[in-house]
Amino acid sequence: MKRLVVITAGLSVPSSTRLLADLLGDAAARAVEARGVAVEVETVELRPLAHALADHLLTGFPTGELAAVIDRVRRADGLVVVTPVFAASYSGLFKTFFDVLEENTLDGTPVLVAATAGTARHSLVLDHALRPLFSHLHAVVVPTGVFAATDDFGSDGALQKRVERAAGELAALVAGEVGAPLRPAPSAAVTPFEQLLREAGGDAVR
């Protein structure tokens, strides 16, 4: 059984961010199951966790439901993350959640990034903000990100095509298909940079 966790940072109810998260979560589940792999999908709304996140920043310890959510993210085989756009970047609530994760929590985890905004002029947030964030966290970001402006919902189907493509890429990673980037073992050894320099200069370490 594979586990997918969908994280949505929408602030309003109803929320276009949650709507996009549901589209992606459903498509990813179908894509994984189409590969003959059982999958369980859980959606996490960050809005109800705002106070717990603020407390975690001050105390350094997660409590209650936040602690449970962090544990589910740690054990996930793949993530779908969706944020509304504020000031040309991800929301503060979205960033705070990933700020409080322990180092190495997302190492090698396949992640599908997505965002919503009122107009298409914010679409660069995928490449200028979300990809750098998850690369820094050592996640494996799927090639296709999904941006949805207000007009994209209920349009000619172009959004759904992007959703299906991104979901297929995530499913390939989660299912471990041949040719998909592999999730590295947590204990993989890393050669110190100083050692690499010495070896390159002919002074191999023995």
Image (cartoon, grey):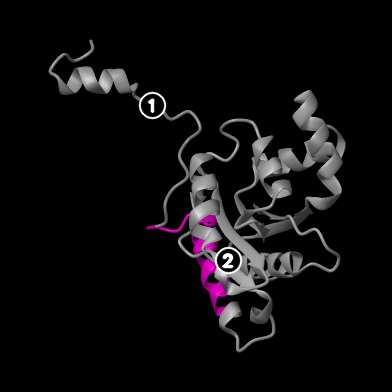
Looking at the image, which residue is at 75% across and 25% down?
60
Above or below 41: residue 76: above
Above or below 52: residue 12: below
- The amino acid pointed to by label 2 is His
Depth check: give the residue in front, 68 or 30. Answer: 68
Give the CA distance from mark 2 to mark 1. 37 Å
Query: Looking at this rendering, what residue extends furthest in the bottom direction?
Result: 156
Looking at the image, which residue is at 54% across and 52% down?
129
The residue carrying mark 2 is 122
Mark 2 or 1: in front is 2
Residue 90 colored magenta? no
- Let me know if residue 29 appears in the view: no
Depth check: give the residue in front, 82 or 25. Answer: 82
Identify the image quadrant of the C terminus: top left
Query: Looking at this rendering, what residue extends furthest in the left direction?
Result: 202
Magenta stretch secondary structure, dominant: helix
Residue 4 percent across, percent down from the top left:
66, 55
Q: Element type at marker 2?
A: helix
Q: Earlier in the sequence, mark 2 or mark 1?
A: 2
Looking at the image, which residue is at 66% across and 67% down?
117
Q: Quadrant of residue 28?
A: bottom right
Residue 166 colored magenta? yes
Residue 65 percent across, percent down from the top left:
85, 40
Q: Element type at marker 1?
A: loop
Looking at the image, which residue is at 80% across and 58% down?
11
The residue carrying mark 1 is 190
- Let me know if residue 195 appears in the view: yes
